[in-house]
């Protein structure tokens, strides 16, 4: 397995089209009105700093500049009837042949670290399939919810407070 780094996707516009295609295919069953352009627009928003929304997309990039995976830190992950204030870890995706190499863990940790840097007390997510994996990373189940007829688990991670120096 080649080494990889986790960086802002905004710095790798050459990967936006692939990332948008992956995201569209992965989540079209949950967001049927989204298109590849929906994701391209989100990447453009994330790249245009400052913005009035929290939207940061991180990418796992191999040493030979191959896109391996994605994860997003966002203020609102569009879960209907959610009472959780956010921010949310969202859209975690690792290329299927690159799973089990720690890429997902590194992406999630980068988003967690960024949420800590921004001094958020809690980070939230919802997942259709990966509840047990997130539990191993310290996340706690809050509740189950139906979204478009699919059962999802809403989870939270309590974040450490940064001490002012």
Image: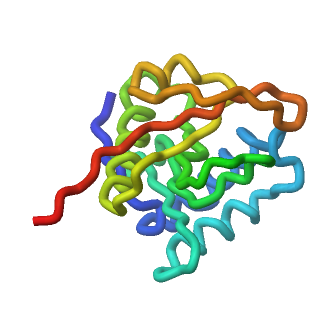
List x then y, in percent, for residue 123. 48, 46
Note whether 27 is above or below 54 in the view shown. Answer: above
List x then y, in percent, for residue 144. 71, 27
Total residue callouts = 0
**Picture quarter with the N terminus:** top left
Residue plotted at (51% across, 47% down): 71
Residue plotted at (18% across, 57% down): 163
Is residue 152 at least partly visible in the picture?
yes
List x then y, in percent, for residue 29. 83, 38
Colour mapping: rainbow
98 left or right of 26 in image: left
Residue plotted at (67% across, 65% down): 40
Note whether 126 is above or below 161 in the view shown. Answer: above
140 left or right of 151 in image: left
**Picture quarter with the C terminus:** bottom left
Note whether 148 is above or below 102 in the view shown. Answer: below
Note whether 159 is above or below 87 in the view shown. Answer: above
132 left or right of 80 in image: left
Is residue 61 at least partly visible in the picture?
no
47 left or right of 65 in image: right
Residue toward you, 126 or 20: 126
Residue plotted at (23% across, 56% down): 162
């Amino acid at each position: 397995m080649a080494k990889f780094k986790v960086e802002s996707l905004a710095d790798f516009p050459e990967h936006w089209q692939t990332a948008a295609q992956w995201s569209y295919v992965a989540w079209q069953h949950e967001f049927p009105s989204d298109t590849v352009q929906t994701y391209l627009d989100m990447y453009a928003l994330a790249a245009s700093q400052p913005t009035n929304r929290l939207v940061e997309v991180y990418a796992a990039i191999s040493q030979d500049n191959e896109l391996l995976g994605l994860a997003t830190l966002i203020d609102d992950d569009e879960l209907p009837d959610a009472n959780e204030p956010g921010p949310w870890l969202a859209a975690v995706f690792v290329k299927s042949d690159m799973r089990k190499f720690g890429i997902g863990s590194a992406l999630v940790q980068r988003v967690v670290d960024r949420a800590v840097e921004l001094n958020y007390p809690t980070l939230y997510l919802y997942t259709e399939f990966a509840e047990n994996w997130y539990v191993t990373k310290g996340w706690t189940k809050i509740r189950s919810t139906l979204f478009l007829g699919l059962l999802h688990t809403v989870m939270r991670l309590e974040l450490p407070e940064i001490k002012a120096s």
